[in-house]
Amino acid sequence: MDLTWRPLTLDDAPALARLYAAAEDVDRTGEHFSADDLREELVAPNVDLARATVGAWAGDELAGYGLTRRRDAADPVHMIRLQSVVHPAYRTDAVGAHLVEWFARTSREVHERAFPGAPLELHHGSHRNERWIAGVLTRAGYTHGRTMVNMRVNLADLPPQPPLPDGFEAVPFDFEYDLAALDARNDTFADHWGSTVYQPEAWRHLVTGSKDFRPDLSFLVLDGEKVLAFVLSHHYAYQTAATGLREHYATWVGTRAALRGRGVASGLLGHTLLAAKAAGFDRSALNVDVDNAHRALGVYERCGYRVDDEWHVYVLS
């Protein structure tokens, strides 16, 4: 059947959720999304719904989609994020070719509107089981840039947690510290591969203003009004509905450079895990770059996390 390609609208969120579910039946990425989850993503401030999304339609069925996500800075490279899912029944050479051509053309248009003259890279993440799109990207000249891993720990048999060092206190997140937490995140992740700053609008939409944000399970280490370390948590209700497991997600974990190596990160994360366990969560998860320069895997392993899954980032310069 010939496919009709057009930009997505918010009314397409239910069809997009069905597309993700059909792909998950084959790919087994472990990710589940409701229409509300996807609608929240489509209205993000760095997504241009009309000009930077596309859906492939087979009649009333969404056969695939693509999205290009502008970043908040080009410092010095604008690393546009790409997303795509294609229904297993439509994973053909023609669909793959259409997607990579659309990614190249649309990303250039997004880039020229945002950061004209800056260098551009395209970044597409995929689960290790998503072999079809990995092949499409590789044949189009993308190279494997990084491996990310999901780590998990069961909270029922949580090992003893490392304490915060003397002189440091875990302070519950409060929205009066929202911008201070953003400043700490931007500083902490400034030298991480693939990372760039968040502007307040994107930060509030994607992180602290998300419907899934759990301020009650988020904690800070403060020096006056300055955030020195942070663990910011989310809970994805639709994921729980699909799996039957209440999973706490430590979305952002960071410590400013002056405190690294002193046990602050592991102590604050340990405090968070104990709070998640007391709140009735079954397990905790987080995602980390395996080549993280700050030896983050070791921090997380001290809290009981173990590698559970693998993701890859493909890059085109």
Image: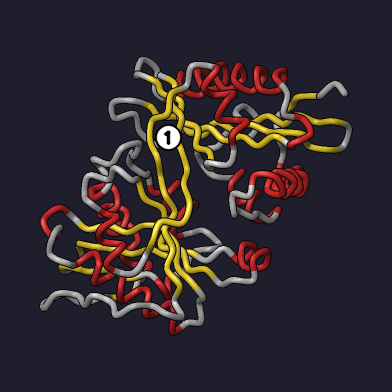
Query: Image quadrant for the N terminus?
Result: top right
Q: How is the image coloured?
A: secondary structure
- Percent across and percent down for residue 60 are 87, 37
* 151 vs 20: above or below: below
> 231 or 304: nearer the eye?
304
Count of numbered circles on the image = 1
Say whether residue 83 is left or right of residue 199: right
**Which residue is pictured at 77% across the width and 34% down the height?**
63
**Which residue is pictured at 49% across the width and 16% down the height?**
141
Return the residue at label 1: 71
> 253 or 114: nearer the eye?
253
Amino acid residing under circle 1: Arg
**Residue at disc 1, secondary structure:** loop
* 87 vs 166: above or below: above
- Percent across and percent down for residue 280 are 51, 82
Neighbor class of circle 1 (other Cα within 10 Å; few <14, some 14-19, many 20+) is: many
**Which residue is pictured at 81% across the width and 24% down the height?**
4
* 195 vs 29: above or below: above
- Percent across and percent down for residue 37 are 63, 54
**Which residue is pictured at 59% across the width and 23% down the height?**
136
Say whether residue 302 is left or right of residue 150: left
Quadrant in which residue 68 is drawn: top right
Query: Image quadrant for the C terminus?
Result: top left
- Percent across and percent down for residue 253 are 32, 59
